[in-house]
Image (spheres, rainbow, N blue to C red):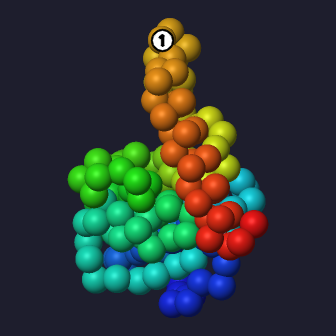
């Protein structure tokens, strides 16, 4: 697992606690992010709580998005959300597709496009989409991107 401490460009921060399944989970999360074309930076930490890891990553990310890979869960967090209210938490212990979906959704948060859902969520949203949540997330992403552009002098 290659780790970096000094991100050169804006990226999603992935914080991982070393454990038996860390490499498998990380590989799938990275694949999801890469398929969406968003850069990421890796960090290793002894913290085991995925929500705490993700929040720390989001707080340090110039993009405001962090992914935490703990021993029992994977979490996607957004810096503008309260620390105890992550965007996504997956406690699926052996669901490779779920791990990759966490990567997709972290990248999609950065890009401001709709999240990928599992089949049950897709069926529920087809019945009754939560337009308010989608609009709120879209507004937050636009705000973060604009703040970043201003900070970079654009």
Please state which of residues 94 and 147 is positioned toward the viewer in this rendering. Answer: 147
Query: Residue at 74% of width from left, 59% of height from top?
Result: 37
Q: Nearer the viewer, residue 130 or 2?
A: 130
In the rendered view, tell whether residue 149 sits above or below residue 141.
Answer: below
Q: Position of 154 compared to 4: left or right?
A: right
When asked about the image quadrant of residue 144, the answer is: bottom right
User: Which residue is the extreme one toward the top?
Assistant: 127
- Viewer can see residue 107: no
- Check disc 1 and report the residue beneath it: 128
Q: Is residue 131 above or below residue 51?
A: above
Q: Which residue sits at x=56%, y=50%?
A: 143
Task: Judge the density around disc 1: few (<14), some (14-19), many (≥20) Cα neighbours within 10 Å.
Answer: few
Q: How far across and down, in percent of the image, does residue 153 sit?
A: 71, 72
Position in image of residue 44 (x %, y %): 41, 83
Residue shown at 28%/83% (left/top)? 46
Residue drawn at point x = 61 percent, y = 47 percent: 142
Is 109 on the left or on the right of 34, as rendered? Answer: left
Q: Decide which of 58, 123 is in the foreground and name it.
A: 58
Quick one: SS at disc 1? loop
Does residue 139 appear anywhere in the picture? yes
Percent of width and height locating residue 134: 53, 30
Q: In which quarter of the image is residue 8?
A: bottom right
């Amino acid at each position: 697992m290659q780790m970096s401490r000094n991100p050169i460009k804006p990226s999603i921060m992935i914080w991982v606690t070393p454990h038996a399944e860390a490499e498998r989970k990380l590989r799938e999360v990275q694949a999801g992010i890469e398929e969406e074309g968003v850069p990421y930076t890796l960090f290793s930490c002894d913290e085991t709580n995925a929500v705490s890891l993700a929040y720390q990553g989001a707080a340090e990310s110039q993009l405001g998005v962090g992914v935490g890979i703990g021993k029992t869960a994977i979490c996607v967090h957004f810096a503008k959300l309260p620390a105890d209210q992550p965007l996504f938490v997956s406690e699926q212990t052996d669901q490779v597709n779920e791990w990759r979906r966490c990567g997709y959704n972290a990248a999609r948060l950065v890009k401001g496009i709709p999240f990928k859902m599992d089949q049950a969520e897709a069926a529920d949203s087809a019945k009754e989409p939560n337009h308010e949540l989608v609009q709120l997330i879209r507004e937050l992403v636009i705000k973060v991107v604009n703040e970043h552009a201003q900070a970079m002098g654009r």
